[in-house]
Amino acid sequence: MARYWSLLKKELRTSRMSFFILLFSIIAWDVFLSTRSNSWDKTLIFVLSFVPVVVLPFYAFVGGFSSFREEWQDKTIYLLLLLPVRGTTLTSVKLLSVFIEILVFVTTIFIGVMIFGQKAFPVTMPYQVLIQGGLILSIAMLMLATMSQFAYLAGRLFERFQWLVSLWVFILLWWGIGRLSSLLSYLLKWLPDIQVKCWQISGIWDYLGEGTVPPTFSIHSAALVAVILSYLIIFFLGSWFLEKYAEI
Amino acid sequence: MNRDVKESDRMNSFLKCEGVTKHYFLKKALNDVSFKAERGIIIGLIGPNGSGKTTLLKTIFGLCRPTKGRVLFEGKYPDRSTKAKIAFLPEIDHLYDWMTVHQTINFISPFYPDWEKVRMAKLFDLLNLDERMEVGKLSKGQRARLKILLTLSRRSSLVLLDEPLSGIDPVSRRKILQAINSEFRAEEQTIILSTHEVLEAESIFDRIIILEQGNIKLMGNIDDIRQKSGKSIRVLLEEVYG
């Protein structure tokens, strides 16, 4: 565990520049919006407070892709591949670092959303919605980072045209994951659905409009497990490439 | 993969390279390289740039896969478990510039169960390093000394040193050779050292392998070679490479 923590600290330290630049940009955006609160419509300000979310997919993509690319570029990949650790240790620590950073960004963005939401609407937004939205967003970004990391590692298996291979792998992954998830979903259709009674993102506008009781909604377990399994397959495959086949 | 290794291979030799060939696109980096090594010797891997020294060391460690042939270390193909037993010093600068010497040691040492603090402290004094300095601010010679410290602080049975003397000042070269000499455990360790600096390193070698364009040009016990030819290794090399 101490070794994993040591690797994670190294990852967080390596990406701290881009992390702080984006974090301060999000805060600066919120500060800017708060200065407009007297002149702009409050609902518009509330909607605009979501804008930094647009940057997150880009950050996750670059985080997944370039975390290994930079190691290769700086030759520090030697140091990592000299360590007697599993490929999964190296790949997971990089993804965890991206996930932690995304969580911090999402929390910061949603604090702004909450503050501007309170000013724009007479009722307070239920915290479950924010936690739910934040987690779904962060996990989606983690999935994107997993895909871009896999695409980069797949490219490293080739001596030439690595960029082209990575690009095609990334494009084909969308299709591949869709197909694999459909297949797994079909195979797992025996799994029972889960019923949850709470506020959810899709019901937020009802809530804000009418303030009704939390609805019950159903989670399609087979599809959910299928998607998770598909990403786990990609993750383990990428780690296997790194440990067994990546050359330096 | 390891299931294919025969028991006889496992018992026979400490390190075995059998017909190792490595292609990079159109270039053949290694061509049918075969040799065996037992414990307790220092092997000099000698050859000009592009002769395949680095590729051979990387293949032994497992950073490259041979296109043909195989490498067996203690009867196993190179993998994660052999990484824990082999210490490898790459020629390039592979350390994080932003870390201090102290942070670098603290980052790397927990990964190796064979790391010896006493040995490290001894090497620290011998190599004259300042642990507060950032790696990025170290001179080339100091970096080379740090790399040798990180490699020799382990109780590894096989040590692969890729050009540890290349492009550094005479003082650092002397200190590095001194460190290799003083920390070599003849009873349990083998060192393979690739170098251009034959004149300085010749005295520590028990055996040499001379590579040219990926082929073994000459290989054997250094004393036997000197005796048979009646020439120093340096003179021999000049003859081999023209």
Image (cartoon, coloured by chain):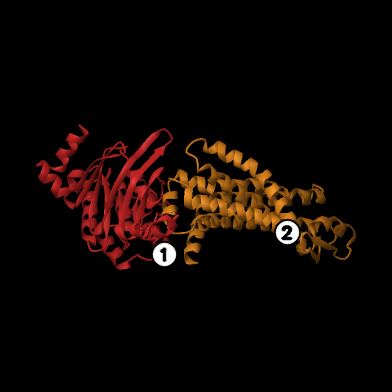
The reply to whether residue B205 is visible in this rendering is: no
Classify 10 Å Cα crowding around label 1: few (below 14), some (14-19), many (20 and above): few
Asked if badges 2 and 1 are on one and the same chain, I answer no
Q: Amino acid at mark 1?
A: Pro
Q: Among the chains, which one is orange?
A: A
Measuring from the top left, give residue A194's x and y in whole percent. Answer: 78, 65
- Chain to which mark 1 belongs: B
Total tally of numbered discs in the picture: 2
Q: Among the chains, which one is red?
A: B
Q: Residue at x 33, y 48 (%)?
A: B18
Locate the C terminus of chain B by quadrant. Answer: top left
Comparing B50 with A186, the one in front is A186
Comparing B18 with A76, the one in front is B18
To which residue does mark 2 refer? Answer: A188
Measuring from the top left, give residue B178's x and y in whole percent. Answer: 21, 55
Marks 2,1: beta carbons within 8 A: no
Q: Distance from label 2 to label 1 (Cα)?
A: 42 Å
Q: Amino acid at mark 2?
A: Leu
* Tag 1 secondary structure: helix
A197 up-or-down from A25: above or below: below
Measuring from the top left, give residue A133's x and y in whole percent. Answer: 74, 57
The reply to whether residue A247 is visible in this rendering is: yes
To which residue does mark 1 refer? Answer: B110
**Residue B213 shown left or right of residue A101 in the figure:** left
